[in-house]
Image: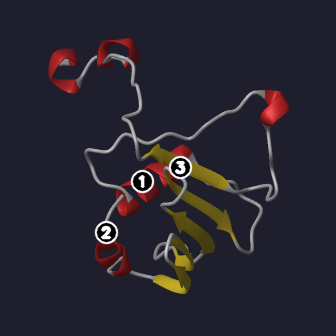
Amino acid sequence: MKTLEEIRKIPNLRIDTLADDGFFAFWTDPIDRRVYSIILSWGGGWEHFSINPVKNDKTPSWDFMCKMKEMFFKDDEACVEYHPAKKDYISQLEHCLHIWRPLEKELPVPPAIYVGLKKKYSE
């Protein structure tokens, strides 16, 4: 995760409540002016980001979440959006999504070739 100093420089981010292990904030999308609530935390062995639209009923898209990952996490960090077993599913806010990264070990990731060809090989 980026440092708090780096995060504070994100345009249109207003940190509302700051604690030792994270913060609650509002972020306004500069393109469509939608406002989102954000929780960022780094306690309990995890870095965690959640985002929820404040006044609309649209769940953030994959592309939008990629933008959030770039804003709040470092480029060399692998992060994940979990799809838990159905019995473990929790949804307190219908359109809220989360990004997670464990602090004590690296996330396993599949070999890149399992996902697809990198651009230089597909041309």
Q: Give the residue pinned by disc 2.
A: 3
Query: How far is the residue under mark 2 from the one under mark 3?
Result: 16 Å
Mark 3 or mark 1: name the one nearer the start of the chain: 1
Q: CA distance from mark 3 to mark 1?
A: 8 Å
Q: Are marks 3 and 1 in contact (CB under 8 Å)?
A: yes
Q: Residue at x 51, y 71 (%)?
A: 22
Name the mark on residue 99: 3
Query: Which residue is disc 1 drawn over?
Result: 69
Q: Residues within 10 Å of mark 1 (few under 14, many from 20)?
A: many
Locate residue 50 relative to residue 95 in the image: left or right: left
Q: Amino acid at mark 3?
A: Ile
Q: Helix, strand or loop at disc 1? A: helix
Q: Which amino acid is tagged 1?
A: Lys
Q: Of tags 2 and 3, which is closer to the observer?
A: 2
Tag 2: amino acid: Thr
Q: Residue at x 50, y 39 (%)?
A: 80
Total labels: the figure holds 3
Q: Secondary structure at mark 3?
A: strand
Q: Earlier in the sequence, mark 2 or mark 3?
A: 2
